[in-house]
Image: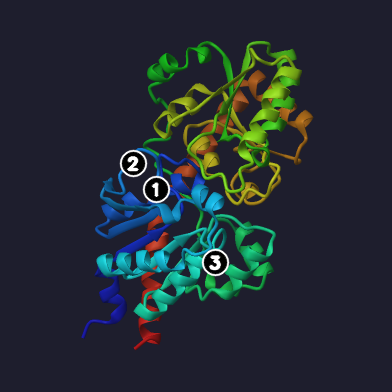
Amino acid sequence: MQGFKDIMSEKKLKIAQIHWGFPPLIGGVETHLTIMLPEMVKRGHSVVLLTGTADGVKTRYQYKGVDIYRSPLFDLNWLFKRGLDGLEEEIEQLFNKFFDEFKPDIVHTHNMHYFSEVHIKLFEMICQKKGVPLLLTAHNVWDDMLFLKLTKNIKWTHIIAVSHYIKKELTGVGFDDKKITTIHHGIDTKVFRYGVDTKQALKNHPQLKGRKIVFHPARMGLPKGCDVSIKAFNLVKNRFPDALLVLAGTKNIIDWGGTQQKDIAYFVDLVKAFNLKKNVYVNFFKLEEMPALYNLAHLTVYPSTASEPFGLTMLESLGCGKPIIVTQMGGMPEIIQNGITGYVIPVKDFEMLADRIIHLLEDDRVRRRLGRTGRQMVQIHYTKEIMTASILSLYKNLLGVFDTNTN
């Protein structure tokens, strides 16, 4: 009789993915899902995503072969305002209906170790009742009791950490390292590449034409170091008066705690204080515009002041052959090698950031070398194919162990 592992290698899985948001909501996790889920479908698996509602978007539809199932009970912006009290029965009904309709082989959650104890405890109960493995990808860590409680006390079958930094943080709060696997993100290197047509992007954003562009692609917020980039540009403009800092404006995001507008107001004041109106451009960019923006840029910056868990924009920038300057924070130094694919600088050191920007704008040879090396590194280690294959392999290993333990 054929062995269980051989059978599992051939079996097409029914995979339930769970996350709070999906485009048009924009963020690192949301972008990750747009990359990974269609790739799973492409490999023959059935995939459904349970996520939050979004204005003007249907509650049931398909995205590149993935079944999207939206509910207001996953809308974090609404839940933050409304509160979680009294929703247990509605959430349980939603989960039971979801399980009965889709009958998943595995449940893969994203950042469900935070925000709501109600949601994940109900999922834990149903997964145990149905005999289905419960997997978490930890895209972030937090320093508070809710994170500690939901990381340690939920019976996760396994946790994927998006960087070695995240794995270390999870073990630091007492989670068993044998039940954590680090799987770095991957991107579509056919989308993020050299030679992307930039005509439409220049038509949409004529302010970019003929400028030395430094792109800060992360969403606008203090943890992303937007203020550091603005302070650095106050120095960069003295050497390159035509240089332009491009900031990715923010809308359609999960803003748990409602801090985003306060941060943006501060950045606007900084630009005014430094008289940088002609040197800073802010706009809202769609996901499909990003490859062209990277191609228009001379380099990118991501001077995060928080412990960035990974930073998908690093791979996007390198995929397009553009070097990136990051800070010595979180998982970013795992990807960016100083002087090889970009530069790693101290946190909040706007003078060092300005120095590295000026160096790369001055030296075309170095800038192109770092970009080419980065592109090669992404093609070898950080593609969507490599990432998806690693996750599917983990699923099948877990299902084999889980089946043995439950029969």
Secondary structure at numbered mark 2: loop
> Circles 1 and 3: CB distance less than 8 Å?
no
| Cα–Cα span, label 1 and label 2 | 7 Å
Judging depth in this view, the residue of 311 and 61 nearest the camera is 61
Which residue is rendered at x = 36% and y = 37% of the image?
190
- Name the residue beneath numbered marker 1: 53
Q: Is residue 386 visible?
A: no
- Identify whether 258 is placed above or below 271: below
Position of residue 131 measured from the top left corner of the image (x, y, whole percent): 36, 79
Quarter of the image for the C terminus: give it: bottom left
Q: Amino acid at mark 3?
A: Glu
Secondary structure at numbered mark 3: helix
- Name the residue beneath numbered marker 3: 117
Position of residue 257 measured from the top left corner of the image (x, y, whole percent): 62, 47
Quarter of the image for the N terminus: give it: bottom left
Position of residue 306 measured from the top left corner of the image (x, y, whole percent): 69, 46
| Cα–Cα span, label 1 and label 3 | 20 Å
Which residue is rendered at x = 27% and y = 70% of the image?
100
First along the sequence among labels 1 and 3: 1
Residue most toward the bottom?
A: 407
